[in-house]
Image (cartoon, helix red, strand yellow):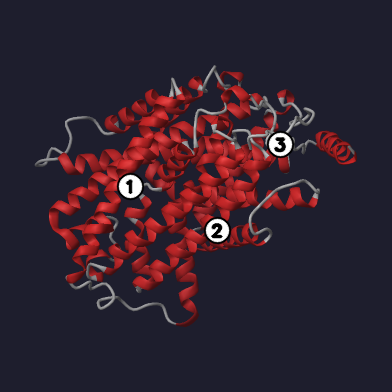
Amino acid sequence: MVKHSNELKRGRQSSADGLASPDPNSGVGHDPAKRGAIGLFSAINIVIASMIGAGVYTTSGFALADLGSPILVLLAWGISGFLALCGAVSYGGLAQRFSESGGEYLFLARSIHPAAGYIAGFVSLLAGFTGAIAFAALTFEAYLMGMVATGEDTSPLPAGVIASLTIIVAWLMHGFRVRAGTRFQDLLVVLKLAMLLAFLAFAGMSLGRPWEGMATAGQRPEGWMVIPALAVSLTWISLSYCGFNAAIYITEETQHGGKTVRDALIIGTLIVTTLYLLLNAVFVLAPPASEVVGKEDVAAVAARYVGGAKLETLLRYVILLSLATSVLSMMMTGPRVYAKMAEDGVLPGWFKFDAELPGRGVFAQGVLAVAVVSIATLRQLLSYLGLTLSLCAALTVAAIFVLKRRGEPVEVIGYPWTPLAFVIGTLAIVLTAGTQRPIELAVAAATLAVGWFAYQFSHPNRPHLGNESPRPRDQDA
């Protein structure tokens, strides 16, 4: 009773300061009726679908150009995977503490300040989902047209039409019923993993053919210069791991809430990290370095070297499937953030859940993504996304230390080392990237500043987040 009384006092005090933190595994707006639509298997697939996109098939060529050594390239992929796993463990602890959908917006608004949450939600709206969905859809269109094009006429359709249709299909899959969309997505993810495993098996059987990556490797940076070169490569590689947190956006709709999300984040990240290391071992070790260094289609070049045109075609189909599932996954998770912001009164109520799912939010997400597809400058804006999203992720994990300092229960495996490793590692990558790309860093800072001003503008209608009294713990979580 004394402990419960103290928790109530802390909850009321936090509410007065605008920093309220609802009781673990409960939370504002929690609706038990929403539980059970998404199980662990589907949650893991959402993580995998969000992580495996275009990045893994394109990044290592550039990393090899910077680092010279295939071993250093694989080391960079391993370091990024370790940081992603630390992030998955940390986010899993926050998902158990706050069992609502809403992602970084929810975690920061409840833990640090509503302004921090609003800025994170604003970044998600502009960059994290809308820009990423449009980019994946445009890349899907480019790969598809590259496979079917004949002669000089590459496409009978205007640019952006196929990308827009891809987004519309994703909206139709997730805009009406959760189960229908997740089952279709589960099927695509399983098919994608099966095709990747088939590619790896074929590459393994071809080991009798000389793998020339090491023998033909270029010169690696000398002495301490290898450190900044490695850090720059990490800025690109880390983008391929960004989806490790995908399941936090559907916490309310998962069976057993935060526990399922935590397990999905960890298992999904481990699966993807293993796949990334195996795939990139083929990409940078099999073909001669001269054929892949600095190439954006490093995966296709390696597949052609290992198994000829047929294996290259297979891998291109895998890339198309990866991009399609990325669009599907982000179309599902993004509107959950906006729905939570609408519940808190910082976005119009139109974005709230409608019956089983935020159908109108999914529609709005689709409209925004199609609008971005029509803007030809999207590709020039992508380089700043990693900086912006990494800053939000580091700030989110840092919220764990704020909660712990206030004496609130947050169960994080390996605390304090896992969240500390993620925060320090991520900030080191961001700072290094900022020194090399000051313009992109300035644009990322401007995005955060616009989010702050938008928050101030919404102040008259903004409620105090977390005023609600703590609710009983979710026994399933």
Q: Are marks 2 and 3 in contact (CB under 8 Å)?
A: no
- Disc 2, SS: helix
Which is more foreground, mark 1 or mark 3? 1
The image quadrant where one finds the N terminus is: top right
**According to the image, label 1 marks what residue?**
193
303 relative to 32 in the view: left or right: left
Q: What element does badge 1 sit on?
A: helix
* Residue 365 percent location from the top left of the image: 46, 28
Asked if residue 157 is positioned above or below residue 44 in the image, the reply reads above
User: Residue shown at 46%/75% (left/top)?
Assistant: 226
Which residue does the numbered mark 2 point to in the structure image? 430
Q: Looking at the rendering, in which quadrant would you find the C terminus?
A: top right
Q: In this image, 139 relative to 404: left or right? A: left
Residue 283, numbered label: none
For this orientation, the residue located farthest to the right is 2
* Label whose residue precedes the other's in the sequence (2 or 1): 1
Q: Nearer the viewer, mark 2 or mark 1?
A: 1
Task: Tell me the quarter of the picture where residue 159 sits.
Answer: top left
Residue located beneath label 3 in the image:
114
Q: Front-most of 199 and 369? A: 199
Circle 2/circle 1 CB separation < 8 Å: no
Q: Measure the alpha-carbon separation of dots 1 and 3.
A: 39 Å
Residue 259, percent across and down? Answer: 60, 42
Name the side, left or right, on which 42 lies relative to 61.
Answer: right
Earlier-in-chain disc, 2 versus 3: 3
- Residue visible at 29% across and 47% down in the picture: 194
Which residue is painted at 37% across and 34% down in the image? 185
- Identify the residue at image location x=19%, y=65%: 206
